[in-house]
Amino acid sequence: MKRFVTAAAVSAAALLGTTAYTQAAEVEVIHWWTSGGEQAAVSVFASEFEARTEHTWLDTAIAGGENARAATMQRILGGDAPGAAQFNPGRQYEELIEAGLLLDLTELAESEGWRDFMRPPSTMAACDVDGQVWCVPVNIHSWNWAWASIPVFEAAGVEMPTSFAEFLEAAPAIQEAGYIPFAIGGEGWQINGAFGVVQTSIIGLDNREAILNGKDLDLARELMPEVFETFRSFKPFTDEGSANRNWNDTTNLVVTDQAALQIMGDWARGEFAVAGEVAGEDYECLALPLASPTVSTGGDIFLFPKQGDPDVEAAQLEMASMMVSPQVQALFNNAKGSMPIRGDVDMSLADACMQKGLAIIEDEANIQVDAQRWLTEDTNAQMNDLIAEFWATDMSVEDAVNSYVSILENAD
Amino acid sequence: MAQRRWRLSSLQAIIGTIPLIGVSVGVFVICIIFSILWSFTSSKLFPNFDWVGFENYDRLWQTSRWIVSVQNIWLFGVLSIVGNMVFGYVLAVFMDQRIRMEDTFRSIFLYPFAMSLVVTGLVWQWMMDPNLGVQAAMQNLGLEWFRFAPLTDANTAIYGVIVAGIWQGTGVTMAILLAGLRGVDQEIWKAAKVDGIPNWRTYLFIALPMMRGAIATAFVLQCVGVVRVYDLIIALTQGGPGIATQMPAVFVIQHITNRQNVGMGMAAAAMMLAPIIVLIAIRALVMWRAAAQEKRAAKLAIAAEERERLEAAGIAAPVAAE
């Protein structure tokens, strides 16, 4: 009994002790950066945050963007909001803004001049709603890339393709040589992403905007059949293990020279870097569409749910400011394989692939607005379902186009 | 005095059950009512009361993912419950043969049930992966023709899920049915033996009908598992390839959380509730009819007794007259 009392006293003292020191706040950050390259990038944020301020970065990594966003939403709605959370720029968080659950960053953004240095302007637009700033864009990611293994193309005796048609022609030779011609993971978003790239390549930026933003249904009926048909012609060149495979495991097939080509956003570059591969020697990055490359301006943003505690609020603002500072942008984006959100960043460390991307983004005409800016998460997910079903089954092109049109028709 | 004591104890009973009543009314009744109300609204991330009528249901039944989910749960439900029952009973009969180390075997068979469905899903995902699972192992042994990768094909993936479901559920069915078997009176076995009935017939035609309670328990447990199947799908296939292994519970949860369409999710949840309500209604009807029949039978019995008594009196009457 006596021993119990002492133990209780000691633990009570310990508890008091830990609660006494709280002026340096702890900011919990929910994100979905779990692969090797992504982790290297997020630890730049964490270590810079802790080095520059007295606050602590509490890391909550949740695998899978959908899961991480769902967890964030649930915690915000449940009154246990995290200090910061990752989202993709677009309409995923519009209701959080409307409901006034996010910390207003306008003052900080105006004093630091975010609107002046962020480029292209559409990057800032994702956070700048009705003149108020609600989130921090941290990078620009483009889906429009294909990653090719040079050794595989050499072993199969095939030239690097200059169009999808050329690749599809060469694919049987690659298959015969014992390699997987086209690596893709069976998750909905991976298939939908590749589909989007194929769509842009075939119908061009203007038609794409007319369909996805303008909801031009007749144009969709006219142009989409060819997109679906072309997309399906990749199917015979995939491997058996594709179902349910993560994107980074899929990229790994190209890294380890088992597969020839993967269509995946520029975050895949981080995986090659972690494996010590060199662009132009071990692997090639093909900017898509091959005829005239564009950059899709997806990426990541962080938003900061409101907290009751002013200490935490101050720490949140410091974190936001840290994320956009030029030095952190350079370190972070080099590790992540993404493009910085400001032009005045020293990217001399960037490898050949990123240099390519940075050159493309210079020209405003090459900017492809991300589909998520126009479509709600609900509509986007419906398209994911449709394209995943089309890919996995023998659904006819006609049915697919009809469903596609009806999703657009009902989109809000 | 006796009446006062009765009142006191009933008051205690009422106080004792108030928390339970509160929870079941609060959690079940009120939440279900709100779910149904919201299914008629345009709620997105936050619930609202902007009525849209049957719009959500309309879209729901035009969504091929939902239709696939409904087909899947029927197929999964029927096959996995039948599989669990059959394998569970066969295992229980084996265990009933007074084998050595029965406890050890029982633990082994029960083990999958103790494991999280997420673990079950991951283990089976690896086993069914063509590049590193059973297929790869057999092919490395030289059996090049061996194929076991149901999850890679949209047409067979649901059967892969069913295999994993049966693996997970058989053990607990066995345990329940074994308890039921042990509960059958030993005299029955002796009698069957004396009559020269073969053992398998005793198991199938005498013991099985006598353990109705155990079977009902196992069945209800399986049904509940089927309706809420979620984690197995998430861990095993994430609903893929394509949408081939989607399930209603996954549909509901994804629409409420990451798809930010509460109205749609609630409509799907209400549709999940519908068959359960139909089942409850059927059960109530059956019970009501059984009760009515019992009443009629009781009435008949009383009448028969009366007649017997009268007859006895009638027979007695002449005797008395004599």
Image: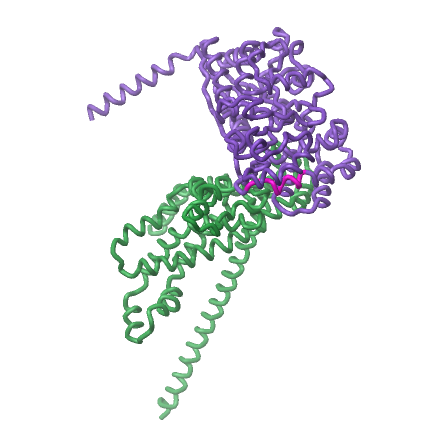
| Residue A237 visible within the image | yes
Residue A97 lies, in percent from the top left, at: 62, 22
Quarter of the picture containing the N terminus of chain A is: top left
Which colour is chain B painted?
A: green
Residue B1 lies, in percent from the top left, at: 33, 50
- Queried whether the magenta region covers residue A237, the answer comes back as yes
Instruction: Give the magenta-colored segment's residue range.
Output: A231-239
Q: Nearer the viewer, residue A401 or B285?
A: A401
The residue at the far right in this view is A218
Quarter of the picture containing the C terminus of chain A is: top right
Which colour is chain A painted?
A: purple
Q: Is residue A254 left or right of residue A342?
A: left
The residue at the far left in this view is A2
- Queried whether the magenta region covers residue A255, the answer comes back as no
Q: Is residue B249 above or below residue A86?
A: below
Residue A142 lies, in percent from the top left, at: 63, 24
Please tell me in which quadrant of the rendered image residue A216 appears: top right
The residue at the far bottom in this view is B322
Residue at 74%, 38% in the rendered image:
A224
